[in-house]
Image (cartoon, helix red, strand yellow):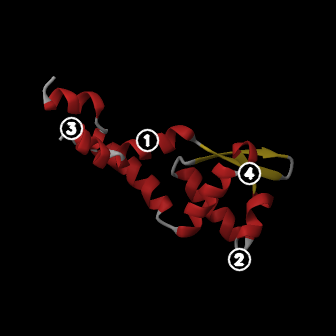
């Protein structure tokens, strides 16, 4: 199997071929949302919470921020396609969207893919 065939078969989309403008915009929105330390921690808290979902009341105490500020950060993560939410009574429960994390992981795996082809 040639290096090009191996690259096409095993490598991340970033190395295999240039990504489209639309795809780049979608990925950039996700990376931009995660570029804030509070949002990165929020995503981690939700992902690592028992059952894979967390209520705002569960994650708010971890921050020295007001409830509206935390809600804003959660909204940014939702709009970026990283979190999903469900209202249950007066509380909103958040969960990570696994496919979104897989997309980011595939792009970031470019270095490992390049080493595999070399």
Lateral position of residue 110 relative to residue 49, left or right:
left
Q: Position of residue 12 (x, y in %)?
A: 31, 39
Q: CA distance from mark 3 to mark 1?
A: 21 Å
Q: Residues within 10 Å of mark 1 (few under 14, many from 20)?
A: some
Q: Position of residue 11 (x, y in %)?
A: 28, 36
Lateral position of residue 98 relative to residue 20, left or right:
right
Residue 19 visible in rendering: no
Residue marked by disc 1: 103
Which structural element holds mark 4?
strand
Residue marked by disc 3: 117
Counting residues from the start of the chain, the first of labels 3 and 1 encountered is 1
Q: CA distance from mark 3 to mark 4?
A: 40 Å
The N terminus, quarter of image: top left
Q: Which mark is residue 54?
A: 4
Counting residues from the start of the chain, the first of labels 4 and 1 encountered is 4
Q: Which mark is residue 64?
A: 2
Mark 3 or mark 1: which is in front?
3
Q: Position of residue 17 (x, y in %)?
A: 21, 38
Counting residues from the start of the chain, the first of labels 2 and 4 encountered is 4
């Amino acid at each position: 199997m040639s290096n090009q065939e191996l690259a096409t078969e095993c490598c991340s989309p970033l190395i295999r071929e240039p990504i489209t403008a639309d795809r780049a915009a979608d990925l950039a929105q996700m990376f931009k949302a995660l570029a804030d330390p509070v949002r990165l921690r929020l995503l981690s808290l939700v992902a690592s919470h028992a059952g894979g979902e967390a209520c705002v009341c569960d994650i708010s105490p971890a921050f020295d921020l007001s409830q509206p500020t935390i809600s804003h950060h959660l909204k940014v993560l939702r709009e970026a396609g990283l979190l999903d939410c469900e209202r249950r009574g007066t509380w909103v429960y958040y969960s990570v969207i696994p496919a979104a994390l897989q997309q980011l992981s595939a792009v970031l795996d470019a270095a490992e893919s390049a080493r595999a082809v070399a």
